[in-house]
Image (cartoon, rainbow, N blue to C red):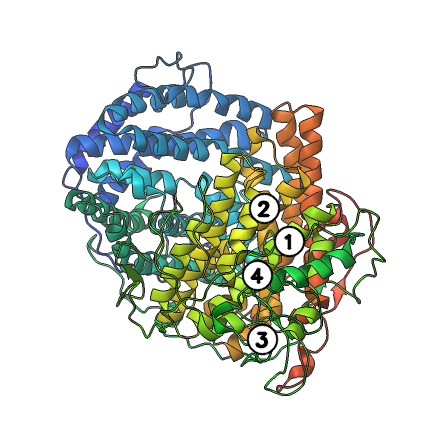
Amino acid sequence: MRTSAQPYRLPEFYLPHPAGLNPHLERTREHSRRWSRAMGILGDPRDGTGREVWSEEDYDAHDYALLTASIHPESPGPVLDLVNDWYVWVFYFDDHFLETFKRARDAAGARAYLDRLPRFMPRERGTPVPEPANAVERGLADLWARTAPLMSDAWLERFSESTLALLRESLWELSNISDGRVPNPVDYVAMRRKVGGAPWSADLTELAVGAEVPARVAGTRPLRVLKDTFSDAVHLRNDIFSYQRETQQEGEVNNGVLVMERFFGTDPQTAADATNDLLTSRMQQFENTALVELPPLLEEHDLDPAERLAVLRYVKGLQDWQSGGHQWHMRSSRYMNGGARAPGPLTTPLGLGLSAVRLRALTPHEGRDATPFPRPDLTAPHPTRTSPHLDAVRDHARRWATAMGMLPPTPNTNEPTNTTPPDDASPHGDAHPRGGTNLRGADSPTSASPQGGVNLRGGVNPRGGVGPRRDTGPRGGANLCGAGPPTSAGPPTSAGPPTSVSPPTSVSPPTNATPHDGVSPHGDADPRGGVRSRRGGGVFRGVGVPGDVGAPVPLGEASRVWDVDGFEAADHGRFAALTHPDAGPDELALVNDWHLWRRYFDDVFVEAFKRPRDLVGARAFVERLRAFVPVEGASPEPADPVERGLADLWRRTAARMSPRERRGLADAVTGMAESWLWEMVNLVQQRVPDPVDYVEMRRRTGGAELSAALLRHVTGAAVPEELAGTGPAAALADAVADIAALRNDLLSFRRETEEEGEINNAVVAVHRFLDCDPPRAAAAVNDLVEARLRQLDRITSVELPVLAAEHDLGAADRDRLARHARDLETWLAGDLEWSTTSGRYRETAAFPGAAAFAGPPRIIRPAGPTGLGTSAARLGPFRSATPWR
């Protein structure tokens, strides 16, 4: 599409890998035309459709054979023919769906049409398929029959899932078009992966290069990130080239440039440049993952030489796809490419360093660049309630923390005395070197903090001033906002205080208390920034049945991270009472103790491992925790308060769970702990996370899955099993996680960056990515929070009811689903209230510009209707951030 009326000049693209061209191009062109005619894609309309989607001229101008030959330059001729047919089919499906259903806004017809397509991809080999009724069904049946004999069952399952996601999520695009709704950036990136086809292309690359990714590593973080970054780069590139056609001719709203344009309130050129910067960032995340995370993974899973070669060929295949796909976009009449840099030979790449974002991403970042700014106003659309058991759970929290060794015994009290203090902790509770108790752990089901939890610090502030200090560490998960002093709950009801916790058996402190000075018996430091375990581990391990339990990792001074004053100022019990107001006394005590443990673990992790950058010790410590969440069997003897608390919690919680539920809870615990290793790798590399990778990992680092699991366990409300794998169900969990985590990052920014040199923070990531000052970055992050609040309301008020109707849920399941959504909103409201009133997050006036941070942030509580699905009415029109340029 070459025209002088282009809405913007194409940006300069980052293409570090040379493009090639398959010598079988002409053979595939000839084959492709014959196959398209045989399937009914070309030629006179048949099957009663009465509509021609592509003319011969359209087909020739698109030149799909050139695409396939460019993205897979080394595939043999027959394989190239097959892969090309898949691409012809998927492009035809997209255009046929547009002409038949999108333009007519025919959601019912689209759903019936899509429901038939899985029948043409049978999972069981040899299963007969129905008689095809149109060109899309005919082509799919032929392609599946030709592909299945070449690939393994594991690959066929993955490819089938990618194909079905691509087909079914087209309804999401149709819904947006019908509503005229431009999605927010987070929602867009997630959904574009499903509808955009690039994950599908990544799977197809295995077929094209003749190298399957071994099934046992296909679902690991490094391979998942490689696929996601590849997909995002492919989609964003396509969006830049497709903007004019999609927005001016097709009425499309699902385009990354348009998303940037609307979200930031800017012009198309600036939005296109920002989209290209994000594309570059995703490609550099791909490179960093391949160089830093992939090699340890190959060692960890002990892949044999053939399997390693297959993985590396797959990675190279994805790189070839990026370069070849770009060259095709520059030539195809399907896209806006007038006025672009002359493409030149197919083997000519664009060089490294053509835009500032590339240099920013490759420049080490040491943190400590905080610029004080007024805390942004935070919106609280949901009301708060407080449990009548508040006083009882407050008392229980102090007793349990003392029993576990997290707090020193309080003089002149009847606290348990048969618990050995942690790692020769002083009974007097020495002052924390940063001023008080630093507890973290994500408190929100969404607190996707790169460390999760609320960081409670208390005690003397070395900068001046006395009093509890708000967490700045790896971010406390539940750092949201609430207004006003703690709600008085009155005396506990007659239900009585929570059941007292029996102290664990006495545990002697470890004797091998030698600190890890970079080298330890737990493994060797990896020069790439990861950790090479002597048992063959990479930076991350998948969650599994605990194996051999390694030696305890001594925590030393880090175990005394909390003191009594800071603990009391934090008011942990009030968090549980606000987020679970309807829980009984025993359930409330259990919820309280889990979040206490998370915050304590988070604070200890910062002091013991993050500050000294001890990846080796951190890895060994995290691996040992697996033994304390066994699906079956007993736990080993705990050696410190973190292990002791987890052992006690697991004993009290797992006994009432099925094996499946225990597995889910164990995965949530270990997944959160392992994600902190990702943060440590960023710190060691001094590399600010890619913004998309950051948002997605923030959900794990803050322990969102653990918080959500506890909420379901206590309330009994949940997404019905038949809906658990659907898009709206996943979007619900992600929206809640993002709201809490991003709010926390706003409140934690100054202390994290200035005092801890932290770089795992959303404001830092946006500041680095957009090259804007922190106040504008914070405004953009807060706008994203507002957008996610709207997304949450849309999910609960529109998408979940439609989903329930589609699956014909009964009254009981509908009630469970509605209660679960209300419980999540209650959780967010309580988390917000506690985070802005707890001493754990309170700032002092002891640093330059502190007036901007002093006191709790202003909380906007919009007037209007209340109840499930009414927050959008109270939020009002979307507020765009100040443009960053």
Q: How much space separates mark 2 and mark 3, taking CA atoms?
A: 27 Å
Q: How much space separates mark 1 and mark 4, taking CA atoms?
A: 10 Å
Looking at numbered disc 2 in the image, what kind of residue is underneath it? Answer: Arg
Residue at (20, 47) in percent of width and height: 308
- Looking at marks 2 and 4 on the same chain, the residue that comes earlier in the sequence is marked by 4
The answer to whether residue 690 is above or below residue 95 is below
For disc 2, the marked residue is: 652
Tell me the element at label 2.
Answer: helix
Q: Residues within 10 Å of mark 4 (few under 14, many from 20)?
A: many
- Looking at marks 1 and 2 on the same chain, the residue that comes earlier in the sequence is marked by 1
Looking at numbered disc 3 in the image, what kind of residue is underneath it? Answer: Pro
The answer to whether residue 531 is above or below residue 101 is below
- Looking at marks 1 and 4 on the same chain, the residue that comes earlier in the sequence is marked by 4
- Looking at marks 2 and 3 on the same chain, the residue that comes earlier in the sequence is marked by 3
Total count of labels: 4
For disc 4, the marked residue is: 404
The image's mark for residue 830 is none
Q: Are marks 1 and 2 in contact (CB under 8 Å)?
A: yes
Is residue 481 something that shows in the picture? Answer: no
